[in-house]
Image (tube, helix red, strand yellow):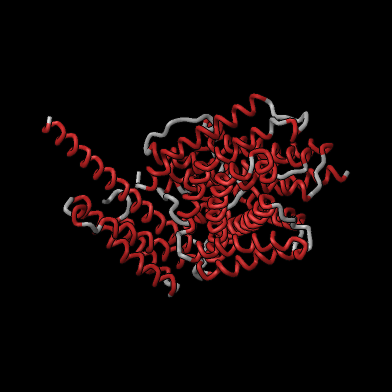
Amino acid sequence: MTAILDLVLGIVTSIGGFVEVGSISTAAQAGSEFGFQLIWAIAIATGMVAMLIEMSGRLAAVSRRSVAAAVRERFGVHFHFVPLTAELIIDLLLLAAEIGGAAIAVKLLTGIGFQVWILPIAIAVWLVLWLSGFSVIEYGLGLLGLVTLSFVVSAWQLQPDTADVAASLIPSLPGHDHARYAFLAVSILGATVSPYLLNFYSSGSIEEKLTETELWVNRTTAYVGMCFGGVVSMGVLVTSAMVLQPRGILVDSYDQAALMFVPVFDRWAVPLFAAALGIGCFGAAVELTLNAGYTFAQVFGWSWGANRPRRDAARFSVAFTFVLLGAVAIAVIGFDPLRLTMLSVALTVIVMPAVVLPFLVLMNDEKYVKRHTSGVIGNVCLALLTVLAGLLALVVVPLELLGG
Amino acid sequence: MALILAIALGAGACSRTDRQLQQQREKLDSLSASTAAIADAWLAGSTSGTFTTTALEQTFVLLETQRQALAVPNTLVDQRAARLSQAAEAHARLLAAMMHDVRAADARAVREHLSKLRTIGPGSR
């Protein structure tokens, strides 16, 4: 009965926690510029993230190690230095973007400039981490995140042509702006398959004491939860394609993106959009900050855990506090949160091979996962997709930064 | 050989300018459509004055960025760029007026400025 409850809660919170600043921005831009045409990118990214999340939970359940700890142990600290540094830089940029996204959500409701809200939001993130245990963080924020289902409701109400949507699951070339199309495809991948998720999910599995006998719970939660989460992301894209594209509105700001809810939710459009954006970003900011603490503590061998009294994991707490301060510093400098988001999710894809490939090696090492090693097809598909996406990102990110 | 190279470089430069102008036009059309959508939503009572004002302000900021991108001597010598710049300036004035109208809750003035905006909006540049 407890396992079933865990399963349901896990799936529900995966749905609620799926959408954040990156997925909203990339899907909204993709829909407004290319209609349904980039739905395939969300489908592929969702499949990849579900596989990776399932693997990281399996690693934690069988080896009792998080991804960061296992990579450090298996490959040594010198090898780990490069991917770890790259991941932490990306996490810092993403965290700044998430805090910026939450601040924009408050701005949409109050009309007061987003810069004013950055520090209060960062303090709120820190207080949640300081005062709450892992379950409150995961389930509480995940359940609140169910407000993002409003994107699915909106897409459903707009009654898109299902044949068109289904046809967009197969990749096709656009009629215009090929570089921009490739950049958005890469960004969707980066927004969905954030490297921090691997370590966060494995650390969370250890916090929740997931065991080898509960691997089926892990598998079901990862695949079902992530697939439903992907549907929410597709809801953003479909709504944007049906509302903004016909009017010729390209998404350059969150104010423009908020307009996508007006035909369906009328007076509730802006409050609902702000709630979805704000809660999604706040939840992701809490996760990213917590993961920074996990990563530092696991790499340097400190005691860690959101469920531990803070004095028993002092260095872990100091680490996540400093990372949060770093992100606040980036956010208050005055970067446009939407541009910062698009840049960090695209850079994520460049970094991804350095994070994913060592992890795939681990998942085939019986010393860590015993008889639960990954299948050949899954390994090859994930490795190829990661490397191809990384190479594509290396080409299109400079193109986009230089103006196409 | 030198002639071919010169033609190729010239053609490259032309196509690059054309592409940039096309991108500018698309951005300006998008901002024009956004302004209309924001104003329409306010007139229909779907959005608050607070949101409408900040959304129009944000559109104004984006419009200024586009205007600055156009305000380069080498670009402005092109007649098409000059027309775009003029249209962007007119749009900026209308946006400023609409922000004022929304703050004053003057729906009639917003409608009036909106209809003027549609005359300089997408397709008229």
Q: Quadrant of residue A312?
A: bottom right
Give percent across and percent down for residue B108.
39, 68
Give percent across and percent down for residue A359.
64, 37
**Which residue is drawn at the image coordinates 43% and 31% (left, top)?**
A173
On the picture, is A230 further left or further right than B27?
right
Residue farthest toward the bottom in the current orientation of the protein = B104
On the picture, is A339 further left or further right than A276?
left
Q: Looking at this view, is A156 or A321 the one in front? A: A321
Q: Is residue A155 visible?
A: no
On the picture, is A230 further left or further right than B49?
right
Q: Looking at this view, is A159 or B65 the one in front? A: B65
Position of the C terminus of chain A, as image quadrant, is: top left
**Which residue is drawn at the image coordinates 43% and 70% (left, top)?**
B102
How many discs appear? 0
Position of the N terminus of chain A, as image quadrant, is: top right
Vertical order, A192 against A109 (above or below): above
Vertical order, A370 against B17 (above or below): above
**Which residue is drawn at the image coordinates 52% and 29% (left, top)?**
A170
Residue farthest toward the top in the current orientation of the protein = A376
Q: Is residue A97 visible?
A: yes
Residue farthest toward the right in the current orientation of the protein = A1
Q: Quadrant of residue A78?
A: top right
Give percent across and percent down for residue A175.
38, 34
Give percent across and percent down for residue A276.
61, 56
Q: Quadrant of residue A234?
A: top right
On the picture, is A202 further left or further right than A288?
right
**Which residue is drawn at the image coordinates 79% and 37% (left, top)?**
A215
